[in-house]
Amino acid sequence: MLAAVPSSVAIPLVVACGYVLGSIPFAATVARRHGVSDLLQVGDRNPGYWNAKQQIGDRFAVPILVLDTAKGAVAAALGLAIAAPDQWWLAYLAGGAAMVGHAWPLFAGFRGGRSVLTFVGAAAVCAPLPALVAVAVFVAAWAGTRNFAWGARAGIVIFPFAQILIEGPNRTALTGVLMTFIGLRFLQAQLGVVSDTTHNL
Protein backbone atom coordinates (compact mmCIF):
# COMPACT_ATOMS: atom_id res chain seq x y z
CA MET A 1 0.00 0.00 0.00
CA LEU A 2 1.23 3.51 -0.79
CA ALA A 3 1.16 6.28 1.78
CA ALA A 4 -2.36 7.39 2.63
CA VAL A 5 -3.41 10.57 0.86
CA PRO A 6 -5.75 13.16 2.44
CA SER A 7 -9.34 12.80 1.27
CA SER A 8 -9.30 16.27 -0.29
CA VAL A 9 -6.64 15.00 -2.70
CA ALA A 10 -7.54 11.31 -2.87
CA ILE A 11 -11.16 11.74 -3.94
CA PRO A 12 -10.58 13.93 -7.03
CA LEU A 13 -7.47 11.90 -7.88
CA VAL A 14 -9.20 8.52 -7.96
CA VAL A 15 -12.27 9.93 -9.70
CA ALA A 16 -10.17 11.54 -12.44
CA CYS A 17 -7.86 8.55 -12.90
CA GLY A 18 -10.74 6.08 -12.83
CA TYR A 19 -12.75 8.04 -15.36
CA VAL A 20 -9.80 8.39 -17.76
CA LEU A 21 -8.99 4.68 -17.47
CA GLY A 22 -12.61 3.77 -18.08
CA SER A 23 -12.73 6.05 -21.12
CA ILE A 24 -10.19 4.03 -23.10
CA PRO A 25 -12.32 2.45 -25.89
CA PHE A 26 -10.65 -0.95 -26.12
CA ALA A 27 -13.63 -2.65 -27.78
CA ALA A 28 -13.89 -0.08 -30.56
CA THR A 29 -10.13 -0.16 -31.14
CA VAL A 30 -9.88 -3.95 -31.33
CA ALA A 31 -13.00 -4.21 -33.48
CA ARG A 32 -11.61 -1.70 -35.98
CA ARG A 33 -8.45 -3.78 -36.32
CA HIS A 34 -10.66 -6.71 -37.34
CA GLY A 35 -12.71 -4.86 -39.92
CA VAL A 36 -15.61 -3.44 -37.88
CA SER A 37 -15.39 0.32 -38.33
CA ASP A 38 -18.11 1.31 -35.84
CA LEU A 39 -19.71 -0.95 -33.23
CA LEU A 40 -22.45 1.67 -32.81
CA GLN A 41 -23.75 0.77 -36.26
CA VAL A 42 -23.80 -3.03 -36.03
CA GLY A 43 -25.37 -5.74 -33.86
CA ASP A 44 -26.98 -4.38 -30.72
CA ARG A 45 -25.06 -1.09 -31.20
CA ASN A 46 -23.33 -1.46 -27.87
CA PRO A 47 -19.65 -0.48 -28.16
CA GLY A 48 -18.55 -3.11 -25.66
CA TYR A 49 -17.25 -6.65 -25.35
CA TRP A 50 -20.41 -8.58 -26.10
CA ASN A 51 -21.26 -6.83 -29.35
CA ALA A 52 -17.62 -6.92 -30.42
CA LYS A 53 -17.46 -10.66 -29.70
CA GLN A 54 -20.48 -11.26 -31.89
CA GLN A 55 -18.97 -9.24 -34.72
CA ILE A 56 -15.33 -10.40 -34.70
CA GLY A 57 -15.54 -13.78 -32.94
CA ASP A 58 -14.65 -15.12 -29.51
CA ARG A 59 -10.90 -15.47 -30.09
CA PHE A 60 -10.34 -11.95 -31.37
CA ALA A 61 -12.48 -10.47 -28.60
CA VAL A 62 -10.39 -11.95 -25.77
CA PRO A 63 -8.19 -8.81 -25.48
CA ILE A 64 -11.35 -6.74 -24.97
CA LEU A 65 -12.51 -9.09 -22.20
CA VAL A 66 -9.17 -8.74 -20.44
CA LEU A 67 -8.65 -5.01 -20.96
CA ASP A 68 -12.18 -3.87 -20.09
CA THR A 69 -11.95 -5.92 -16.88
CA ALA A 70 -8.51 -4.47 -16.18
CA LYS A 71 -9.86 -0.92 -16.36
CA GLY A 72 -11.99 -1.48 -13.28
CA ALA A 73 -9.34 -3.51 -11.49
CA VAL A 74 -6.55 -0.97 -12.00
CA ALA A 75 -8.78 1.93 -10.98
CA ALA A 76 -9.94 0.15 -7.81
CA ALA A 77 -6.38 -0.90 -7.01
CA LEU A 78 -5.28 2.74 -7.22
CA GLY A 79 -8.01 3.71 -4.76
CA LEU A 80 -6.99 0.89 -2.45
CA ALA A 81 -3.30 1.79 -2.70
CA ILE A 82 -3.72 5.36 -1.47
CA ALA A 83 -6.51 4.70 1.03
CA ALA A 84 -6.10 4.96 4.77
CA PRO A 85 -7.53 1.99 6.74
CA ASP A 86 -10.86 3.76 7.14
CA GLN A 87 -10.98 4.82 3.48
CA TRP A 88 -11.68 1.41 1.93
CA TRP A 89 -14.54 3.04 0.03
CA LEU A 90 -12.00 4.85 -2.20
CA ALA A 91 -11.57 1.60 -4.15
CA TYR A 92 -15.31 1.55 -4.86
CA LEU A 93 -15.27 5.21 -5.82
CA ALA A 94 -12.41 4.66 -8.24
CA GLY A 95 -14.05 1.57 -9.73
CA GLY A 96 -17.31 3.46 -10.08
CA ALA A 97 -15.52 6.30 -11.85
CA ALA A 98 -14.04 3.77 -14.29
CA MET A 99 -17.54 2.43 -14.94
CA VAL A 100 -18.78 5.95 -15.67
CA GLY A 101 -15.84 6.44 -18.01
CA HIS A 102 -16.67 3.21 -19.81
CA ALA A 103 -20.32 4.26 -20.14
CA TRP A 104 -19.58 7.83 -21.25
CA PRO A 105 -16.00 7.71 -22.56
CA LEU A 106 -14.03 10.91 -22.98
CA PHE A 107 -12.15 9.41 -25.94
CA ALA A 108 -15.17 8.03 -27.83
CA GLY A 109 -17.72 10.80 -28.05
CA PHE A 110 -19.27 9.94 -24.66
CA ARG A 111 -20.99 6.90 -26.19
CA GLY A 112 -19.88 3.76 -24.41
CA GLY A 113 -20.89 0.36 -23.11
CA ARG A 114 -22.76 -0.93 -20.09
CA SER A 115 -19.74 -1.31 -17.79
CA VAL A 116 -20.29 -4.96 -16.82
CA LEU A 117 -16.68 -6.08 -17.26
CA THR A 118 -15.35 -2.90 -15.68
CA PHE A 119 -17.55 -3.68 -12.68
CA VAL A 120 -16.18 -7.23 -12.56
CA GLY A 121 -12.62 -5.93 -12.44
CA ALA A 122 -13.42 -3.41 -9.71
CA ALA A 123 -15.35 -6.00 -7.69
CA ALA A 124 -12.44 -8.45 -7.83
CA VAL A 125 -10.19 -5.87 -6.18
CA CYS A 126 -12.74 -4.42 -3.76
CA ALA A 127 -14.01 -7.79 -2.53
CA PRO A 128 -11.65 -10.61 -3.53
CA LEU A 129 -13.15 -13.40 -1.40
CA PRO A 130 -16.74 -12.88 -2.58
CA ALA A 131 -15.34 -12.54 -6.09
CA LEU A 132 -13.74 -15.98 -5.78
CA VAL A 133 -17.12 -17.42 -4.79
CA ALA A 134 -18.73 -15.71 -7.78
CA VAL A 135 -16.05 -17.07 -10.11
CA ALA A 136 -16.64 -20.60 -8.77
CA VAL A 137 -20.38 -20.24 -9.40
CA PHE A 138 -19.69 -18.84 -12.87
CA VAL A 139 -17.45 -21.78 -13.77
CA ALA A 140 -19.95 -24.31 -12.42
CA ALA A 141 -22.89 -22.70 -14.24
CA TRP A 142 -20.90 -22.40 -17.47
CA ALA A 143 -19.85 -26.05 -17.26
CA GLY A 144 -23.40 -27.14 -16.50
CA THR A 145 -25.16 -25.09 -19.17
CA ARG A 146 -22.36 -24.82 -21.78
CA ASN A 147 -23.46 -21.20 -22.03
CA PHE A 148 -21.02 -18.41 -21.15
CA ALA A 149 -23.77 -15.79 -20.79
CA TRP A 150 -25.74 -17.83 -18.26
CA GLY A 151 -22.58 -18.58 -16.33
CA ALA A 152 -21.71 -14.88 -16.20
CA ARG A 153 -25.21 -13.98 -15.02
CA ALA A 154 -25.05 -16.59 -12.26
CA GLY A 155 -21.69 -15.30 -11.06
CA ILE A 156 -22.82 -11.68 -10.98
CA VAL A 157 -26.10 -12.49 -9.22
CA ILE A 158 -24.39 -14.54 -6.51
CA PHE A 159 -21.68 -11.94 -5.84
CA PRO A 160 -23.61 -9.58 -3.51
CA PHE A 161 -25.11 -12.50 -1.57
CA ALA A 162 -21.65 -13.94 -1.01
CA GLN A 163 -20.35 -10.51 -0.08
CA ILE A 164 -22.98 -9.77 2.54
CA LEU A 165 -22.23 -13.10 4.22
CA ILE A 166 -18.47 -12.58 4.12
CA GLU A 167 -18.05 -8.82 4.50
CA GLY A 168 -21.32 -7.49 5.89
CA PRO A 169 -23.76 -4.83 4.70
CA ASN A 170 -21.62 -1.69 4.37
CA ARG A 171 -19.39 -2.88 1.54
CA THR A 172 -22.27 -4.79 -0.03
CA ALA A 173 -24.29 -1.57 -0.15
CA LEU A 174 -21.62 0.05 -2.33
CA THR A 175 -21.60 -3.01 -4.55
CA GLY A 176 -25.35 -2.52 -4.86
CA VAL A 177 -24.80 1.05 -6.03
CA LEU A 178 -22.42 -0.12 -8.77
CA MET A 179 -24.78 -2.92 -9.84
CA THR A 180 -27.68 -0.46 -9.93
CA PHE A 181 -25.64 1.67 -12.31
CA ILE A 182 -25.34 -1.32 -14.65
CA GLY A 183 -29.07 -1.94 -14.41
CA LEU A 184 -29.78 1.66 -15.35
CA ARG A 185 -27.43 1.37 -18.33
CA PHE A 186 -29.32 -1.69 -19.56
CA LEU A 187 -32.61 0.15 -19.08
CA GLN A 188 -31.26 3.14 -20.98
CA ALA A 189 -30.18 0.86 -23.83
CA GLN A 190 -33.58 -0.82 -23.91
CA LEU A 191 -35.39 2.51 -23.99
CA GLY A 192 -33.12 3.55 -26.86
CA VAL A 193 -34.11 0.44 -28.82
CA VAL A 194 -37.79 1.13 -28.18
CA SER A 195 -37.33 4.74 -29.28
CA ASP A 196 -35.56 3.71 -32.49
CA THR A 197 -38.33 1.21 -33.26
CA THR A 198 -41.01 3.85 -32.69
CA HIS A 199 -39.28 6.29 -35.01
CA ASN A 200 -39.16 3.64 -37.73
CA LEU A 201 -42.90 2.93 -37.64
Image (cartoon, rainbow, N blue to C red):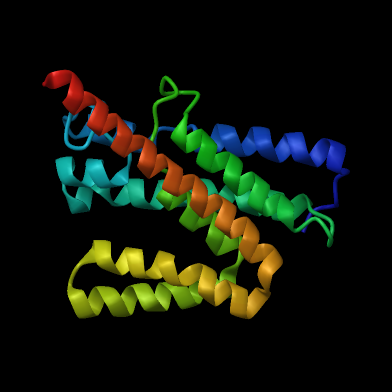
At x 67% / y 37%, what residue is drawn? 15
- Number of marks: 0
**Residue 37 appearing in the image:** no
Query: Foreground: 163 or 81?
Result: 163
Looking at the image, the residue that sits furthest to the right is: 6
Looking at the image, the residue that sits furthest to the left is: 201
Query: Foreground: 134 or 164?
Result: 164
Estimate the x, y position of residue 65 in percent, counting from the top left: 35, 51
Give the quarter of the image for residue 97: top right
Estimate the x, y position of residue 44 in percent, counting from the top left: 21, 37
Lateral position of residue 88 relative to residue 69, left or right: right
**Residue 59 sits above or below residue 150 on the image:** above
- Quarter of the image where the N terminus is located: bottom right
**Residue 46 sits above or below residue 135 on the image:** above
At x 88% / y 43%, what residue is drawn? 6
- Quarter of the image where the C terminus is located: top left
Estimate the x, y position of residue 63 in percent, counting from the top left: 33, 48
Lateral position of residue 182 relative to residue 150, left or right: right
At x 28% / y 76%, what residue is drawn? 141
Estimate the x, y position of residue 146 in percent, counting from the top left: 17, 72
Give the quarter of the image for residue 26: top left
Give the quarter of the image for residue 127: bottom right
At x 39% / y 69%, what residue is drawn? 155
**Residue 25 sits above or below residue 118 on the image:** above
Lateral position of residue 157 relative to residue 139, left or right: right
**Residue 13 appearing in the image:** yes
